[in-house]
Image (cartoon, grey):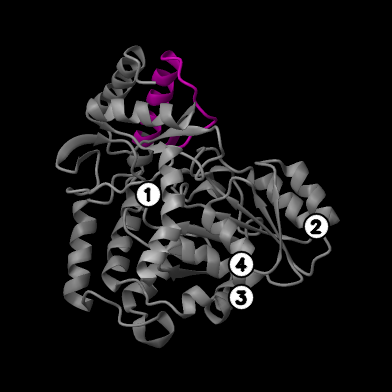
Amino acid sequence: MAGASLDAALRPALEERRARSLYRQRRVIESPQGAEVVVDGRAYIGFCSNDYLGLANHPQVRSALKAGVDSLGAGSGASHLVCGHSREHHALEEELADFCGRERALLFSTGYMANLGTVTALVGKGDGIFEDRLNHASLLDAGLLSGARFQRFTHNDTDNLDRRLARAEARRKLVVVDGVFSMDGDCAPLSNLAEAAHRHDGWLMVDDAHGFGCLGAQGRGTPELQSVGGAEVPVYMATLGKALGTAGAFVAGSEALIETLIQFARPYIYTTALPPAVAAATRASLRLVREEGWRRDVLQARITQFRKGARALGLTLMDSQTAVQPLLIGDEQRALALASALEARGYWVVAIRPPTVPAGSARLRVTLSAAHTEAQVNGLLSALGESLAQGGL
């Protein structure tokens, strides 16, 4: 009876979401990640993965993962602070710190946990946290759960942030932004944000999940692209499951910051560590990011190609020069219809709808990769043109 009562209580919200064309459904991938994927038994050219550099199925990364399993087993056994911190974890942290030009780095099992653990370790009751309105959900949740007074400033509006910081009476002030905004693809103006934070005795934290590995001459992310240093961004977070093609996340910064997280970040303290083999695979990915700068060059060429072609089709592009290239549609049903029309032509692009994006801003989130060929991007553009001409919208 209790089960039936629960189902009866839950069903109306599910039915409402279906009626509003907002229902989410999972698809089953039957191939490795790559430009070509098999989904539910059918082959597609995929344009919705965050595997920006094409490393998720790279032979060297796969070999490192296998060798890691052979050497250290499938699981880590416990949290980092009990007995789960392996030599592969430790080596990866040291290499990430060196790559980012920071004193230390700390691994987390997911990006969500890294954000939640870092924010709640740094601020609490009596403090203030200031977040861009378009921040990732994990950052927003972290701010709300921290106990600090939570404020959201207008997207990329430094003046609005400055006014909020000036009015705030808080023991600590933490400004938190995405480096690259995951649904719009634009970048935060880090230098201006850092100046505002410093002017009001605050700290700037950047979640660079979609910039790390892709942006900057060496792939060091949004700070490198914008020539912003560690003093301006004392808290730097990035994930490993996007450009690096593996899994997990890290926070990089000073010795004091990392020791604070080890002592006080609950999602770090109370979670089983990533499998050491994943850390080994990530070390191989990081070496490829360092050594194969051509991947970033190819990625940028595909971005330029797509934007030029989309403009020629009259599509509404957003202000993005990154691998995230959203096509703004507006209406949820129209976005789903266009995604379905593309799928019928062999191209897999996901329609993003509220509540992931604001109401009235449903879109196709096209993501580009160094693994895509010029012909594949041209094929997507042709499919978009055909879909529009045949009423795909």
Element carrying mark 1: loop
- Return the mark for residue 256: 3
Looking at the rendering, the stretch of residues picked out in magenta corresponds to: 298-325
Which residue corresponds to mark 2? 200
Count neighbours of disc 3 (C-alpha within 10 A) and say few if under 14, some if 14 to 19, many if 20 or more: few
- Return the mark for residue 145: 4
Element carrying mark 4: helix
The kind of residue tagged 3 is Ala
The kind of residue tagged 4 is Leu
Q: Quadrant of residue 81?
A: bottom left
Count neighbours of disc 1 (C-alpha within 10 A) and say few if under 14, some if 14 to 19, many if 20 or more: many
Whether 313 is among the magenta residues is: yes
Q: Earlier in the sequence, mark 3 or mark 2?
A: 2
C-alpha gap between disc 2 and disc 4? 23 Å
Front of the two marks 1 and 4: 4
Q: Earlier in the sequence, mark 2 or mark 4?
A: 4
Asked whether the beta carbons under mark 3 and mark 1 sit within 8 Å of each other, the answer is no
Where does the C terminus fall, quadrant-wise? Answer: top left
C-alpha gap between disc 1 and disc 2? 34 Å
Front of the two marks 3 and 2: 2
C-alpha gap between disc 1 and disc 4? 29 Å
